Image: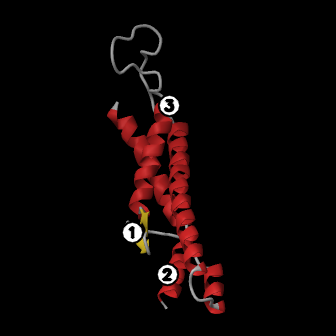
Amino acid sequence: MLIPIGIVMLSGAVGGIVNALVSDNGFVRPSEETAGDVTIIRPGFAGNILLGAMAAFISWGLYGAFSNAVIWGANTGMGTEEVTVSIASIAGAVLVGIGGARWLTNEVDKKLLRTAAVTAAASKPSFDDSQKIARATPAQAFNIAKKMYKE
């Protein structure tokens, strides 16, 4: 029973890795960003992998081969046959892992952009910095705005 769970969670972790590859953040380490009294936790690639694995586990637990398995008490009759892991459950786990990790990445990026906008609005106007922010990733925009605020 532990082998299918491990395969599904590993597949979800692969989804988290794929998300780290396709997002602007790449393989950044988990860190905290601070601007004034606002602290943003960036889970980095490790958070993507962990959330991808957990999202795949939850999906598999809800819809996978063991979704009707009884974990407490006795079960006789239907549902007692041997459980298998299919290619569809692995593919679904990878997809859910990507989606779960993508959700986390988007939430962090949204907070970074919101904080960058507030910080830039409170700073001395700079046309050059505004153009840099327009082309930057959320983390880069946050750092540009933070530098604008310090100047």
For the residue carrying disc 2, how many other residues have a C-alpha within 10 Å: few (<14), some (14-19), or many (20+)? Answer: some
Foreground of the two, 122 or 130 = 122
> What is the x, y in percent for residue 127?
66, 91
* Residue position for label 2: 146
Q: Amino acid at mark 2?
A: Lys
Q: Position of residue 56 (x, y in %)?
A: 47, 43
Q: Amino acid at mark 1?
A: Glu
Q: Judge depth for marks 2 and 3 and give the one in front.
A: 2
Q: From this view, report whether residue 102 is shown above or below residue 111.
A: above
| Percent coordinates x, y for residue 124 in the rendering | 58, 89
Q: Which residue is mark 1?
A: 32
Report the residue at 37% width, 41% height from top: 6
Question: Disc 2 to disc 3, how far (Cα)?
Answer: 43 Å
* Above/below status of 106 relative to 90: below
Query: What number of labels is visible?
Result: 3
Q: Earlier in the sequence, mark 3 or mark 1?
A: 1
Residue 29 in view? no
On the image, which quarter does residue 126 sit in?
A: bottom right
The circle on residue 115 is none
- Return the disc, 2 or 3, that comes first in the chain's sequence: 3
Figure check: 122 above or below 79: below
User: Could you tell whether 124 is left or right of 1 in the image?
Assistant: right
Residue sitting nearer the eye, 125 or 50: 125
**Residue 33 % position (x, y):** 42, 72
Dot 3 corresponds to which residue? 62
**Which numbered mark, 3 or 1, is in the foreground of this view?**
1
